[in-house]
Image (cartoon, rainbow, N blue to C red):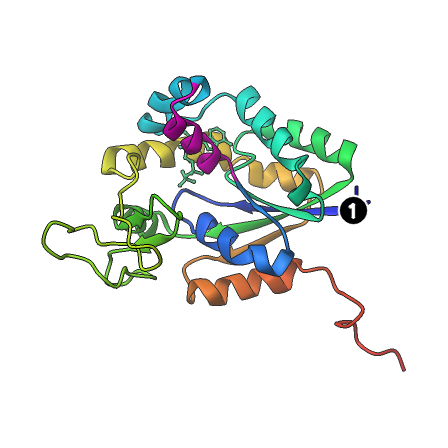
């Protein structure tokens, strides 16, 4: 196991672009994207016991138990592809989760760095309402005029949601992307997750704020990449 693994923690409100950024940053950091939301939705799709237990919680926009997500993350970061670096999307989301995460990291010599994607709530609500997802490959699309990555084929008869540019699957709207559930998720974020900003500062965890509404997703990921990518000997300025 490597001595010092980096954990990039993508932090921010629902709809701030964590998932989009995580996908783009896997190449920059050579790290897998670990999304607790994706893991939970995968179990729901499988229809296994865990999935059945959490289905109604996700549908309502509430948070699942700390113990459950802590365990899922701990199992995931011990897998072979996560030994260089990891990108966490949607974890930690509460103070007890952050406490548990620091314990996990201390035992494994993982160094966390937080990127807080800041986006105005009105923008978030607009973005989430227009969000569409490919159920096959997970690519995110937006049907908004101002949104990034509109599906090339949308609004056609029988397929108003559009199809995935990559595999042609019929796009879907996430069940929790409806107006009342979006509001509930933002409330949960305000109450349970936002206090972590202070927590990160109090615990001396490297922390950067990035404006998640300025620029294209690619420009934002380049900004993040330059903030977190370890300086390699080739990048370092020559010593004279
Ligand atoms: P978003 O950030 O857009 O809300 P996610 O895919 O990260 O979407 O999460 C979807 C849902 O999964 C959350 O509303 C919550 O029910 C559950 N979830 C994901 N991560 C956590 C977590 N760390 N703790 C508790 N619940 C979580």
Q: Position of residue 30 (x, y in %)?
A: 64, 55
Q: Is residue 46 magenta?
A: yes
Q: Respond yes or no on whether mark 1 lies under 8 Å from ligand 1.
A: no
Q: Quadrant of the N terminus?
A: top right
Give the quadrant of ligand 1. Answer: top left
Position of residue 107 in the picture relative to residue 99 (left or right): right
Q: Which residue is mark 1?
A: 4
> 213 or 129, which is in the foreground?
129
Task: Please indicate whether residue 157 sits to the left or right of residue 199 in the image.
Answer: left
Q: Image point 25% across, 54% down: which residue?
A: 163
Q: Main secondary structure of the magenta part?
A: helix
| Residue 122 placement (x, y as % from top left) | 30, 49
Residue nearest the viewer, comparing 166 with 61: 166
Tally of numbered tags: 1
Q: Quadrant of residue 54?
A: top left
Q: Which residues are magenta?
A: 35-48
């Amino acid at each position: 196991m490597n001595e010092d693994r980096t954990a990039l923690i993508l932090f921010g409100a629902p709809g701030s672009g964590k998932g989009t950024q995580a996908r783009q940053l896997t190449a920059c950091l050579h790290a897998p994207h670990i999304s607790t939301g994706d893991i939970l939705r995968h179990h729901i799709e499988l229809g296994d016991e865990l999935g059945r237990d959490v289905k109604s919680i996700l549908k309502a926009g509430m948070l699942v138990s700390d113990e459950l997500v802590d365990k899922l993350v701990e199992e995931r970061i011990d897998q072979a592809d996560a030994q260089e670096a990891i990108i966490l999307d949607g974890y930690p989301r509460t103070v007890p989760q952050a406490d548990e995460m620091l314990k996990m990291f201390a035992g494994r010599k993982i160094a966390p760095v937080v990127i807080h994607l800041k986006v105005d709530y009105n923008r978030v609500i607009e973005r989430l309402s227009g969000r569409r997802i490919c159920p096959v490959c997970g690519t995110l699309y937006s049907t908004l005029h101002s949104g990034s990555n509109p599906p090339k084929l949308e609004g056609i008869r029988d397929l108003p949601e559009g199809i995935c540019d990559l595999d042609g699957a019929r796009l879907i709207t996430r069940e929790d992307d409806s107006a009342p559930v979006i509001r509930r998720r933002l409330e949960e974020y305000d109450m349970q997750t936002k206090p972590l900003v202070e927590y990160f500062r109090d615990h001396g965890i490297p922390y950067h704020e990035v404006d998640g509404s300025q620029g294209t997703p690619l420009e934002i990921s380049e900004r993040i990449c330059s903030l977190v990518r370890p300086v390699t000997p080739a990048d370092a300025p020559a010593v004279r």
